Each structure stands twice: as C-alpha cells, then as structure tokens.
Amino acid sequence: DQQVKQNSPSLSVQEGRISILNCDYTNSMFDYFLWYKKYPAEGPTFLISISSIKDKNEDGRFTVFLNKSAKHLSLHIVPSQPGDSAVYFCAANKGFGNEKLTFGTGTRLTIIP
Amino acid sequence: DGGITQSPKYLFRKEGQNVTLSCEQNLNHDAMYWYRQDPGQGLRLIYYSQIVNDFQKGDIAEGYSVSREKKESFPLTVTSAQKNPTAFYLCASSIRLEAQHFGDGTRLSIL
C-alpha cells in the first residue's frame, strides 16, 4: 500500500521556467512533509519541509504548498536551473521532526538548457 | 566537517554469505536509520534506532539485523536469509525536530 505517491516518474522543464512536482498521500495521520533531492550514487539531501499547520513554506527558489483537504502537496522551483536536474522525493511522517519517514517513489526532473 | 560516512561504496556478496554495511556519524545525532532503495521505488525503512542500545524494525526488516552499541555507529548486517539483497542501502541520522541527513549509500550486489 503506497501511502505517499508521486505519479509522475519524470518531468522536463526549460531552464528559467517553473518546475512543479506533485505528491499525494492517503494517510490522514501524516502531519509533517519533506522534500529531498537526490543525485545518482549519492544520498538524498533535504530541501524543504512543511507542517500540517501551514499551507505554504518558502525558501529561496523553493516553495512547498500543502492542501490538506486534497491530501496533496507540491514543490515549486522558480526559476529552474540546470543544477536542479535530479530525482525529487517527497516524504511524510506522523510527528514533527524525525522517525519513520514514508517516501514516495520519486520524480526525475530534467532541466533543459 | 560533520557528516555521515557509509562504507564501502560498493560491496559484493556471494550467495549464502552475511555481509555488514558500516554507518558512522559525527553529528551527535541520537536517531539513526537504514533504508533500502530499489530501481523505480522510493526509500523503504529497514531498521531505526532512537537511542543507544535500542532499535526497532521498519517496514522491511526480514533478513536484516542491526546493533547500536555506540551513538556514532549503526551497522547493518544483510544475512543469507534476505532473498533479494541487491539494492542501494542508505543510512541516515537526525535529532529531534530536524530532518534526516543521509550518507552517500552502499550499493550491494550478489556475485
């Protein structure tokens, strides 16, 4: 049972445009959500997070939006840069902080120069 | 410079052998985790430990064992009972109220 779903395995975006990565979840107990970025043969790197008491969190070029009623979150990257090409994972857990993250299957983002 | 070190980066195992993957952190984090990644799949939790001398099974613990004798170290043993051990293994650590930090992984292959 996939509790965190990333339905788009891949996405291509022109450099300078907006990249939007989507994530859906089914477990209503999740209340803390994270996005990680992963390059090949490396570990994931934490990007940005959001708790369920917010609907938006922004950090530089990265913004995460949370729609609790739809059980949907999205990551916006503006403007997209070639270094953003990577696999992006969303993850969720039932408590603010750590332990037992449930990951989605990832979306491979390719930025076209 | 603080971080998480996983060794080796590549590991080969013969059928029927146990193999141990190393994970060391100098971040002074209390919690440590082991995940497995297969092609086209997300990370799945194998084991996690919130304090020294204590650990819990994750979602796919069968065929694996761990120990947490020191705060800095959380080795994972892939036993011969693990039927499909070929995968990319990732170790992570965290402190409360912060996101997990990951090592660069160990790729295990069966000869």
Image (cartoon, coloured by chain):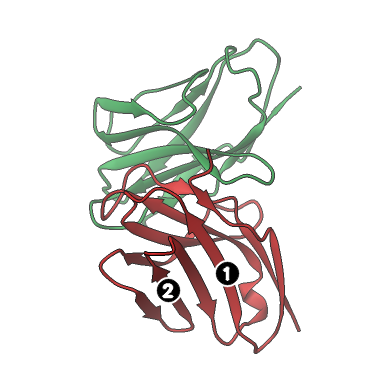
In the picture, which chain is red?
A
Residue A12 versus residue B43 in the image, above or below: below
Q: Residue furthest front?
A: A69
Q: Quadrant of the N terminus of chain B?
A: bottom left
Q: Earlier in the sequence, mark 2 or mark 1?
A: 1
State the image quarter where residue A54 is shown: bottom left
Pointer 1 residue: A21
**Residue drawn at x 42%, y 74% as measured from the top left:** A65
State whether residue A56 is above or below residue A16: above
In which chain is the residue bearing label 1? A
The green chain is B
Residue drawn 36% across the image and 46% down it? B93
Report the quarter where the C terminus of chain B lies: top right
**Nearer to me, B70 or A39:** A39
Q: Position of residue B52 (x, y in %)?
A: 24, 31
Total labels: the figure holds 2
B91 lies left or right of B87: left
Would you name the residue on which mark 2 appears?
A65
Q: Give coordinates of residue A29: x percent, y percent.
A: 31, 49
Numbered disc 1: secondary structure: strand
Q: Chain of mark 2?
A: A
- Rendered residue at 34%/67% (across/down): A50
Q: Residues within 10 Å of mark 2 (few under 14, many from 20)?
A: some
Where B38 falls versus A94 (above or below)? above
Q: Position of residue A3 (x, y in %)?
A: 48, 46
| Amino acid tagged 2 | Phe
Q: Is residue B34 visible?
A: yes
Q: Is residue B68 visible?
A: no
Residue A57 placement, left or right of B16:
left
